[in-house]
Amino acid sequence: MRVFYAVLILFGLNMTCYANQEYKIEKVLHNGDYIINGLHWKPQSNCAVLRKGDKIKFFNNKANGKCVSTTVMLDNSKSTCNLWCEDPRSDG
């Protein structure tokens, strides 16, 4: 019975790690910035791999724009990109 509970707990922890919601890149602006989840994001480094319609996941669940910076992962290639918020609703 203890083994069952251990497996159940490990499975639950594993599932929470992969439960991050996916978002689509709505728009790539002419200056290389992105609109994701209705918010303006500016790349901190070269993120040329990101294209309109790509599915991404936010590390640290920062998709709401309440952040200074975050990292996103492109779902199909596992490439990452560092972004920071450019939205007036951001509370820093």
Image (spheres, grey):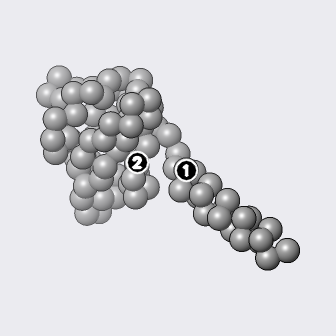
The residue that mark 2 highlights is 58
Is residue 2 among the parts visible in the rendering? yes
Q: Nearer the viewer, residue 69 or 47?
A: 47
Residue at 50% from the left image edge and 40% from the top image edge: 22
Residue lying at the far right in this picture: please name it: 1
Residue 37, picture quadrant = top left
Q: Which mark is residue 72?
A: none
Disc 2 crowd rating (10 Å Cα; few below 14, some 14-19, many 20+) is: many
Q: Is residue 13 left or right of residue 2?
A: left
> Which of the 4 image quadrants contains residue 7?
bottom right
Find residue 74 and report its image quarter. Answer: top left
Mark 2 touching mark 1, by CB under 8 A? no
Residue appearing at x 41%, y 27% in the figure: 54
Secondary element under disc 2, as helix, strand or loop, is strand
Image location of residue 60, percent across then percent down: 40, 58
Label 2, label 1: how many angstroms apart (C-alpha)?
Answer: 11 Å
Type of amino acid under label 2 = Phe
Q: Amino acid at mark 1?
A: Tyr
Query: Who is closer to the viewer here, 48 or 42?
Result: 48
Asked if 81 appears above or below 16 in the picture, the reply is above
Task: Indicate the secondary structure of the residue bearing disc 1.
Answer: loop
> How far across and down, in percent of the image, does residue 51 sit?
32, 24
In the image, what residue occupies the spot 33% across and 36% down? 79
Residue annotated with mark 1: 18
Quadrant holding the C terminus: bottom left
Name the front one of labels 2 and 1.
1
